[in-house]
Image: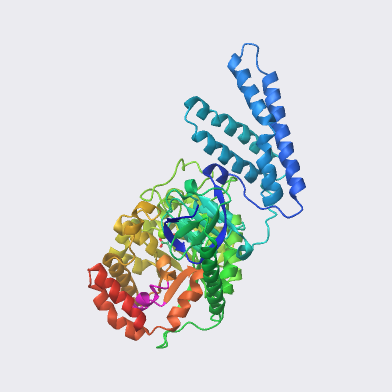
Amino acid sequence: MTFVISGLSVSNGVAIGRALTISSASLEVDHRLIQEGEQEQELKRLYDAFAVAKKELIDLKNSLPEDAPEELGAFLEVHQLILDDPELQKKPIELIKKRRFNAAWALTTELDDLLDTFENIDDPYLRERGADFRQVIERVLVALQGSSSEDKTHLYKKLDRESSDVIIVAQDIAPHDMLRFKELNFCAFVTDLGGKNSHTAIVARSLDIPAAVGVKNASELIEQDDWLIVDGDRGIVIVDPPQIILEEYRHRQAEHRLAKNKLQLLKHTPTKTLDGVKITLMANIEMPEDAQDALAKGALGIGLFRSEFLFMNRLDGIPDEEEQYQAYCQTVISMHGMPVNIRTIDIGADKNLDTAVETITSDISPLGLRGIRWSLSEPDIFLAQLRAILRASAHGKAQILIPMLAQAREIEQTFELITRAKKQLDDRGIAYNPQIRVGAMIELPAAVFILPVFLKHFDFLSIGTNDLIQYTLGIDRADSSVAHLYDPLHPAILSMIYKVIYDCQELGKPVSICGEMAGDSKLTRLLIAMGLTDFSMHASQLLTVKRELLKSDMGKLKQSLRQILITYEPQIQAKLIADLSKI
Ligand code: PEP
Ligand code: MG
């Protein structure tokens, strides 16, 4: 049956494919497509894991003390019966053979289906039996992880999203899982939850695939293998589309591809407005390897390296100074002398570490120990990161960027630690650039109001509009229920951005925007009207923004700015902004 569900568009384009529904349980295991021809080997791993789990159950039962309660023995027998039932392996075997899922993924897919079935049983006693299946499958999963090298041999299929027809459907995807999915071959994704500017959406945008978030109940309404159209332009999902709609969307897909190919022609064109103002376009990255894409799209540097992604998604503790140094070095060297702004760790809100650091016991709220607050509370970890960045500065133009500053005292403490990190390297006789430039993110309203303090201490500023909007309007950027109130054009936001750009330019201090507003081509002319000349965005957005810039006249656009800034009536303001496209 055809039906349409709608949410928020986070990444444009059209994808047509089959649903792969993923639950939070299955997100915890490694997902990868095995190579053609590896099915037999993967099946053997699955069978071996079943055998190990079975042996464990038998050993457990045999080692029960004589006075153990009878229920315990019965419980182990039930688990043994579940494990012996050939039905349990049937679907995972098929998924490995036909869809080339790795064994753990195939098993969790089966687990999700079973849990769904049990949840729909009215009888509470029977419903609870779902837990037995979960425990049995988890036992097999543990055996699988222990076997050969489930987590080590990442024989990922070469990325080829254009020809993939897998569309991920999940209730929610954490940013670090999204990052893991970068390795996978899927052509779009849909989630029940999430806001347009959540870190998950940001990472998805960097993959340049259509996506829709906040599509309420998508993971319940969509079934495994359903045919879907994801219309990323409108944020809608068409389930089980009829032929005629499919054809229309295939046509739109082809148009998108054509437009993308045309954009490639701009790659080497210098970025200048019609009236000759030179604009610097830089890229935002999450991992060192993203720098290649940035270069390929013609970025003139890395305006924001979200270094916290190096710290996430790890079971083996956080990266030490040496490992970070290697990662920063790799990035700096691949950017051939262009600036690389390495933002110090900004965990908290929707980005949390899932690794063992003693002081982190649970998620950090957006108003909690996020960003620089956490770094200052963990001086040893912060110093190690600063030393790693400093060491990388001996190999290229590494620059330090500090997130979430709001207080003069935090600025002082940050510089004290930078000085201490330099001294530690001096004592060890290790080279670094003593003149390394240090910048600050402007992403809290308080920072805008004490701008002179920032201007005094920092070499450059970068406006983080994602958080500036979140903290000014009091809107959780990851919450789809308030996404309609998350308004980059709110007069309070526009006047803050303009104030920062203006004050910086008055003093000749470099300023850029690295929040999502910078990569939204619908806002390019507005930012140019504000006098912005430095933008940083995901590489996938660079050429679209460049196309807009090449058609813009900064001098003329500036003349319309005053009226926009003093218009508080949303409809009139929207019209004034839309009219910029005619200038
Ligand atoms: C921002 O807040 O705009 C920003 C670029 O930082 P992040 O999105 O990583 O919070
Ligand atoms: Mg931020």
Q: Nearer the viewer, residue 573 or 133?
A: 133
Q: Which of 108 and 207 is in front in this view?
A: 108
Left or right: residue 406 versus residue 120 is: left
Q: Which residue is drawn at 30% across and 69% down?
A: 494
What span is colored magenta in the figure? 521-533
Q: In this view, does 103 lie above or below 285?
A: above
Residue 393: in magenta span = no
Report how many numbered discs are placed on residues in the image: 0
Q: Which residue is drawn at 45% across and 62% down?
A: 10
Q: Where is residue 104 in the image (x, y as percent from the top left)?
A: 65, 43
Residue 527: in magenta span = yes
The quarter holding residue 322 reads bottom right
Q: Which residue is drawn at 49% across and 41% down?
A: 358
Q: Which residue lies furthest to the bottom in this view?
A: 275
Q: Which of 383 and 364 is in front in this view?
A: 364
The quarter holding residue 453 reads bottom left
Q: Quadrant of ligand 2?
A: bottom left
Q: Where is residue 4 in the image (x, y as percent from the top left)?
A: 45, 56
Q: Residue furthest top?
A: 67
Q: Where is residue 401 in the image (x, y as percent from the top left)?
A: 45, 63
- Residue 403 appears in view: no
In what quadrant of the picture does the C terminus appear?
A: bottom left
How is the model colour-coded?
rainbow
- Residue 189 appears in view: yes
Q: Position of residue 486 (x, y in %)?
A: 34, 59
Q: Is residue 537 above or below residue 123?
A: below
